Image (cartoon, rainbow, N blue to C red):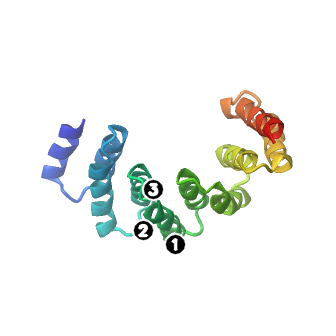
């Protein structure tokens, strides 16, 4: 796949979709330096591209450049403050670098903006369980049971809350 994307970029080097796809393939292949380079080329063209910012943040995380990855969260919010997904990604960025507490307010904002987003509810519940806020995690688990009883995330959330409650 890498060769095909590189050939496509020879034809149209400014194609953002192809460059981001190449970056994703490289990231999945555990080649974060190369993937980061692709994300940054896109960001040179469009500094507010949230897909490139997300890829940049994940690559920085994989490279253990956590301070830089955390700053990407701020860039994500600046890129599109009205987007629930930008808030979710900005919440996940600190989580991925080991700071769940810092990211939870951003995930909560995503839930406020898009209350139907079940992945955001699950993320909020799971994060609350991780930091020991069992009441808040249980609230999200109950919401998941009501709205999506067969969704795999639904069965995971109460288990995470319960496991965390018993380990305290």
Tell me the distance, in whole angstroms, between the alpha carbons under discs 1 and 2. Answer: 8 Å
User: Could you tell whether 84 is left or right of 147 in the image?
Assistant: left
The residue labelled by disc 2 is: 48
Q: Measuring from the top left, give residue 137's x and y in whole percent.
A: 79, 46
The local secondary structure at tag 2 comes to loop
Answer whether labels 1 and 3 touch (C-beta < 8 Å).
no
Answer whether labels 2 and 3 touch (C-beta < 8 Å).
no
The numbered mark at residue 78 is 1
Q: Measuring from the top left, give residue 162's x and y in whole percent.
A: 81, 35
Q: Measuring from the top left, give residue 62's x and y in whole percent.
A: 41, 49
User: Which of the two residues, 144 or 57, is positioned nearer the viewer here?
Assistant: 57
The residue labelled by disc 3 is: 54
Answer whether labels 1 and 2 touch (C-beta < 8 Å).
yes
Quarter in which the C terminus is drawn: top right
Quadrant housing residue 122: top right
Q: Estimate how packed mark 3 is, as few (under 14), some (14 to 19) or many (20 or more) residues with alpha carbons within 10 Å.
A: many
Tell me the distance, in whole angstroms, between the alpha carbons under discs 1 and 3. Answer: 13 Å
User: Which of the two residues, 65 or 3, is positioned nearer the viewer here?
Assistant: 65
Tell me the distance, in whole angstroms, between the alpha carbons under discs 2 and 3. Answer: 11 Å
Q: Is residue 94 above or below residue 159?
A: below
The local secondary structure at tag 1 comes to helix
Q: Estimate how packed mark 1 is, as few (under 14), some (14 to 19) or many (20 or more) residues with alpha carbons within 10 Å.
A: some
Name the residue rendered at 13%, 51% in the picture: 10
**Marks 1 and 2, the one that precedes in the sequence:** 2
Q: Is residue 147 above or below residue 101?
A: above
**Marks 2 and 3, the one that precedes in the sequence:** 2
Does the image show residue 2?
yes
Name the residue rendered at 65%, 44% in the picture: 119
The local secondary structure at tag 3 comes to helix
């Amino acid at each position: 796949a890498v060769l095909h994307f590189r050939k496509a970029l020879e034809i149209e080097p400014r194609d953002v979709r192809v460059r981001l796809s190449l970056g994703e393939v490289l990231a999945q292949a555990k080649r974060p330096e190369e993937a980061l380079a692709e994300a940054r080329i896109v960001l040179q063209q469009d500094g507010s591209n949230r897909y490139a910012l997300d890829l940049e943040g994940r690559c920085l995380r994989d490279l253990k450049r956590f301070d830089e990855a955390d700053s990407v969260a701020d860039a994500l919010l600046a890129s599109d403050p009205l987007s629930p997904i930008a808030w979710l990604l900005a919440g996940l960025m600190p989580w991925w670098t080991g700071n769940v507490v810092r990211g939870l307010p951003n995930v909560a904002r995503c839930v406020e903006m898009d209350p139907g987003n079940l992945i955001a509810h699950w993320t909020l519940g799971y994060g609350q369980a991780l930091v020991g806020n069992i009441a808040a995690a249980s609230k999200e688990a109950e919401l998941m049971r009501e709205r999506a009883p067969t969704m795999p995330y639904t069965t995971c959330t109460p288990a995470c809350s319960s496991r965390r409650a018993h380990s305290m």
